Image (cartoon, grey):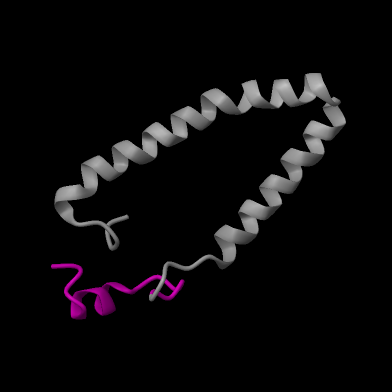
């Protein structure tokens, strides 16, 4: 988050991430229960497993536009003006 967010925007960005996470933690079990009631528990487990697998692939291969997925070293970041 530090390398992608301006210092003045970090608090708001963290608040947004926290709000979305809390909404997911609240809505997720409720939605899974609705799906299980309308289909079956097995179908809910399969859908959850597929969703987790897709999320893992996206997280492992995802890149921000114009940015490599490899983290910067402190030396590279300081040369680029990202760290004091």
Q: Is residue 37 above or below residue 8?
A: above
Residue 6's image quarter? bottom left
Residue at (41% x, 71% y) in the render: 65
Residue at (14% x, 50% y) in the render: 8
- Total numbered labels: 0
Q: Which residues are magenta?
A: 67-84
Question: Nearest the camera: 82 or 53?
Answer: 53
| Residue 33, horizontal then vertical, whole percent | 71, 21
Residue 76 on the magenta segment:
yes
Position of 6 compared to 59: left or right? left
Residue 81's image quarter? bottom left
| Residue 50, horizontal then vertical, whole percent | 75, 47
Residue at (30% x, 36% y) in the render: 15
Name the residue furthest front: 38
Predominant secondary structure, magenta span: loop
Position of 9 compared to 50: left or right? left
């Amino acid at each position: 988050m530090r390398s992608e967010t301006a210092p003045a925007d970090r608090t708001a960005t963290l608040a947004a991430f926290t709000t979305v996470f809390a909404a997911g933690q609240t809505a997720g079990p409720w939605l899974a229960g609705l799906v299980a009631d309308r289909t079956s528990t097995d179908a809910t487990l399969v859908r959850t497993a597929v969703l987790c697998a897709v999320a893992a692939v996206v997280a492992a291969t995802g890149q921000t536009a114009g940015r490599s997925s490899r983290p910067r070293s402190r030396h590279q970041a300081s040369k680029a003006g990202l760290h004091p």
